[in-house]
Amino acid sequence: MNRLFASAILMACCLTAQSQNKLKTSDWEVSISPKGCIEQIVFRQKSGNDTIPFFREKENDGPSFYTRVDNKNSIGQWIPDGQYSYRTELGGIECKLTYLNHKGVPSMKVRLTNRSNVLFQPQKAGLKMGIDTYMDTYPTWFGKYFPTLMRNEATHFYGYLQNPKEHTLGIVSEHPIASWSVDYNLGYQSPAPHWFMGHRIESLNLDLINQLPLPGRHPQQLYELKQNESKEWIISFVNVGALEQLEQTISKVADIPLIYAEQTSYRPNDEASFEVTGESPTITVTDDKGNPLPTSIKATDRRKTVVRVKLPEVGLYTVRVVAKGKQAEAILDVHHTWKWTLEQGRLATLKYHQKPTSHAESWYGFYTAFIAAKYFPDKEIDTQASDYFDVLFNKLHDKDKIVPLYLPNRIQNTSTTIGMLIDKYEAGGKKEDLKKASQLGDWLMNNYQRKDGAYFNHGTVYTSVIYVAKSMLELSLAEKEASKQEASWAEVSQRHYESAKKAIDQLVASQGDFETEGEMTFEDGMISCSALQIGMLALLQTNEKDRKHYTDAMLSILNSHSCLTQLRVPDARRRQGTMRYWEAQYDVFMLPNMFNSPHGWSAWRAYATYYAYLLTGEEKWLTQTFNAMGAFANLIDYKTGDLRWAFVVDPYVEAEQACSADSHYTFSDVSLGNPHPQLYDTRRFVFGESYVNMISDWQTINSQDNDVHEVFKCMGEAVLTNAFIVERPNGEIVGYNCKVKVNGHKLTVIPDEKQISHLHTNLKKAYTISWHGSQKISPVNSPSWLF
């Protein structure tokens, strides 16, 4: 009888679950599985349905309640508990989840209750959201949602996930949420039993309760549940549409203050401007000493305010907004001159050793050293860097044949060395450096380029692994310049140009089906390096049809990359950073995975946005480029001048890092491979939302933290010597890297720094431009270099 009764109850529960598996309105529909998890959310739109995929029949189905206690995760199984409601219990902690229509959007009400006899202080407790973030194969990854921005404020939470098609899903709660995290996949053992982390994301978690420490902006009280205490949250899913509508769309659902700054990075004494969404806000801006600054505040409507504030000196500035009891923060920055930044970067190449290893990332600082030597020569430092490069080059190459001695199939080492030799040649004028670069270019194309044009490594296309084709184009341009004195270089230049063009044509023909080093995924560098190389080739085209062909291809790829970029975060330290997350284990010997953003490879997108501006004249690309440069400049501590490796975005990382050097090597010894961090003494600690220091000053073997210098190489190309003026649709003329004085149809343009020698104009009317004592008439509606 009891068995029959239990079966009847179970059947009734299953029927109840199956009968309530759709929660819907005319605008959206949530499909709920019999297990109580979401299968998908469909938003209905005039342009067609937008479907948000969730994991199905997998360990990371969700939303699911989970706890992490004593380094062990437990996941609850839902039991039906009323209409659209479910409950579960883990270790005496009851979680009840109810799906509902809240303010017209699909939402969840979540209540946690401590029914145990003791205080509950977990490492984490919250929801595995279940949104399908796992990007593993082409073309299915175009429909997956990447967790691009999660933002905890003291009184609320918001964020968004985006797919490569630029569909954006907002997540928002008017209740404070302690933290967030993602589950990163494991990659491979090397050596057993040690695991390196993988390149994919298993799950996004909203950590309703999280142990301290957390960043100061986060709620600080959500680290425990007392006996019989309950806490409740409502979490909503919002169909954002275009990313530019993020704050506006979220504000219709949640009554929270939101801060958006189109520009986040400035020079001393610039006037910053940003928008605040929120009713009757109180707004303060303080410098890094806590001193408040005078602000100009203008309400444009009941819920929109424009704030202007003069930022007097180098440093970070904190914006705080309070509206209707809710508070939000943002960070703006004023950076040092590009000259100071490059000079500090050059000093760092000596402090943080450039090491002869199997990975070019270990000696990437030579880029910064040679670029700084070209524009800001310092005989003692530059001689030291140049001589040591020659020593390192000879350790890694056959001095007679000029071919790599180790891992020749890792062709990005060779293409990177080509780029460094070009910069060394341009700084020092030694033709021997150009000859070596040219020989390496021939070796690379003759041994590692397929008939279809792709540069490869063991059957995998490597064109977009540290932009092999861009390095070949840089070589070709240097050889073309050399041909003005020696005609024989012209043929060599054309040969390398044709090789690079053929490789880039293969990228264009791939239609987004790119390949990369390591685990296949919709990978940051694979996408950004493809875009930047196509963009660079477009700039070299004189035929308008060809130029448009490459520009269109490049923009399509660059737009798809938006889901991997911090385009809306109100934090200048992070703005335009790209969301890499498997580099710490190789670069600074730190586990587990964590978002490193900005990281050296964030520069790859910045090249692309720079090229996009030159090709289209759309100011958004120029703004993005300069925001990126501000974030990159802050990788050097503006107070001490010391270089940091990267900024970690995750708010709470339980880290383990090697803390002992390999005593079997010196810094100048050749070391190969990726040594696992746990092969050395390690230290455990907790940190989040902060910079990570370099380790190449003490770790003797192959660490790859010097890849940070890619940001300075990008800086040298895009902004070190270039100024830009733009006429906006309203007639306002603005300058980047310069000040503009307008006198009728005459413009006097004054560069911000002495080394800025080139001026790009983007004007709708003809003006007489005065620049460095010379005058020219600007072209109309034709963005181009005038000086």
Image (spheres, rainbow, N blue to C red):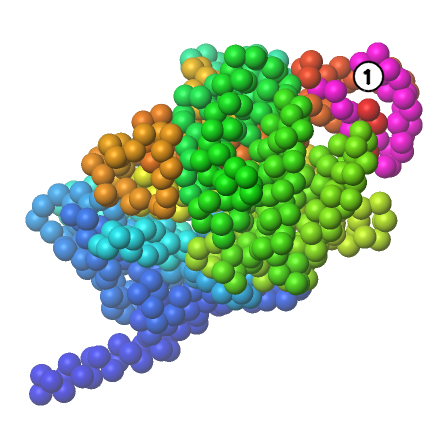
**Circle count:** 1
Give the side of residue 499 with respect to residue 315, left or right.
Answer: right
Q: Which residues are magenta?
A: 756-783
Is residue 275 or residue 500 the one in the foreground?
500
Is residue 74 or residue 283 the one in the foreground?
74
Image quadrant occupied by the N terminus: bottom left
| Residue 761 forms part of the magenta stretch | yes
Instruction: Name which quarter of the figure residue 379 lies in.
Output: top right
Identify which residue is drawn at 74% across, 20% down. 757
Identify which residue is drawn at 32% across, 39% down. 589
Q: Where is residue 154 drawn, in percent x and y? A: 37, 34
Query: 694 above or below 291?
Result: below
- Three-letter amino acid code at disc 1? Trp
Give the side of residue 211 with respect to residue 201, left or right.
Answer: left
Identify which residue is drawn at 50% across, 41% down. 398
| Residue 7 forms part of the magenta stretch | no
Query: 288 above or below 414?
Result: above
**Which residue is identified by label 1?**
771
